[in-house]
């Protein structure tokens, strides 16, 4: 057998690797209308260990421009969301992550390359994973009020919860609260990932959001289906989590 020179072998392996990646079948993104130009997309985690775990974000379509609140984990899924918006004849003007985790901030660099402006809470900027490091175009503290053509959109940081930098988006005309990973879906029985959670602030943050936006009609969670009462549901899970923490450790051996 003829021995392949190393360089050729390396080239073959590289080509094979690229082909395998391209051929990987991604679950298609779902788009759900929440009414009045607001859509929730559900993409998936395409990283090892979390394959096919659904992640949400919200798209606001203005007359000409659009905004995405929370980006998918990867460039490829972010590209699909951008392509979908462009097919509707709109250009993505702003994107914003609701916290620093990858299921919220993963696609930011790609979004910037596509011409969108990255808005970011000052706390998120400070917490970013180094491998993602994105230079935001606009940094805000606590609150930012925007217009996406005919739609109002307010970004607010009302305290820590799922992470120290939790941001919610409020659409006053649609009465939709984009909760992100701070808010759990009705199917969630626990708070899930609490590695970066600020447990002593969580309940107060949720109550502050309820007081600030008393006429919420729909809340979108970071994962799972939207519903009206998800702040209250999440508050229940926070209390459950705290009760469990406070339980004395069972030292019995049987
Ligand atoms: Zn999440």
Image (tube, grey):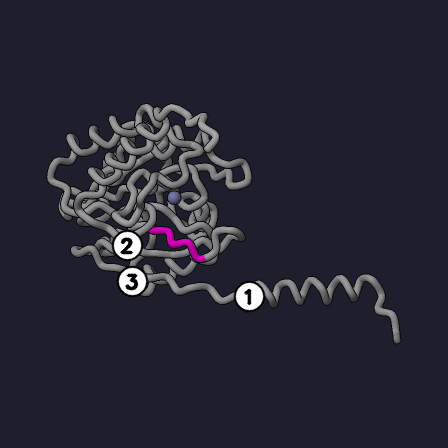
Residue 241 in the figure: left or right of residue 36: right
- In the rendered image, residue 55 lying in the magenta stretch gets the answer yes
Identify which residue is drawn at 51% across, 41% down. Answer: 132
Which residue position holds label 3? 89
Which residue position holds label 1? 22
Q: Residue 175 carries which label?
A: none
Q: What element carries label 3?
A: loop
**Number of numbered markers:** 3
> Is label 2 or label 3 in front?
2
What secondary structure is the magenta-colored segment mainly? strand
Inter-mark Cα distance, 1 to 2 = 26 Å
Q: Report if residue 241 is visible in the image.
A: yes
Q: Give the range drawn in magenta.
A: 52-56
Q: What element carries label 2?
A: strand
Question: Which of the 4 quarters of the picture holds residue 154?
Answer: top left
Q: Between disc 1 and disc 2, whose residue precedes?
A: 1
Farthest residue toward the front? Answer: 254
Query: Is residue 239 shown above or below 22?
Result: above
Q: Where is residue 52 in the image (x, y as percent from the top left)?
A: 44, 57
Q: Do the residues labelled 3 and 1 touch (CB within 8 Å)?
A: no
């Amino acid at each position: 057998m003829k021995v392949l020179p190393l360089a050729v072998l390396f080239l073959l392996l590289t080509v094979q690797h690229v082909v395998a990646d391209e051929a990987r079948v991604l679950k298609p993104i779902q788009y759900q209308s929440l009414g009045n130009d607001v859509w929730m997309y559900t993409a998936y985690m395409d990283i090892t260990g979390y394959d096919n775990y659904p992640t949400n974000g919200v798209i606001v379509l203005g007359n000409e421009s659009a905004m995405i609140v929370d980006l998918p984990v990867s460039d490829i899924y972010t590209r699909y969301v951008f392509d979908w918006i462009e097919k509707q004849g709109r250009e993505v003007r702003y994107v914003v992550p609701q916290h620093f985790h990858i299921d919220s901030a993963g696609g930011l660099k790609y979004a910037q390359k596509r011409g969108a402006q990255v808005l970011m809470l000052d706390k998120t900027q400070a917490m970013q994973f180094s491998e993602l490091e994105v230079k935001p175009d606009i940094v805000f503290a606590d609150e930012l009020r925007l217009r996406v053509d005919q739609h109002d959109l307010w970004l607010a940081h009302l305290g820590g919860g799922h992470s120290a930098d939790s941001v919610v988006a409020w659409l006053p005309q649609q009465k939709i609260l984009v909760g992100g990973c701070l808010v759990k879906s009705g199917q969630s029985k626990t708070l899930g990932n609490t590695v970066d959670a600020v447990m002593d602030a969580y309940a107060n943050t949720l109550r502050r959001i309820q007081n600030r936006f008393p006429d919420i009609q729909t809340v979108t969670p970071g994962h799972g289906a939207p519903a009206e009462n998800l702040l209250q549901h999440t508050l229940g899970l926070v209390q459950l989590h705290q009760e469990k923490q406070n339980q004395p450790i069972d030292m019995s051996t049987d």
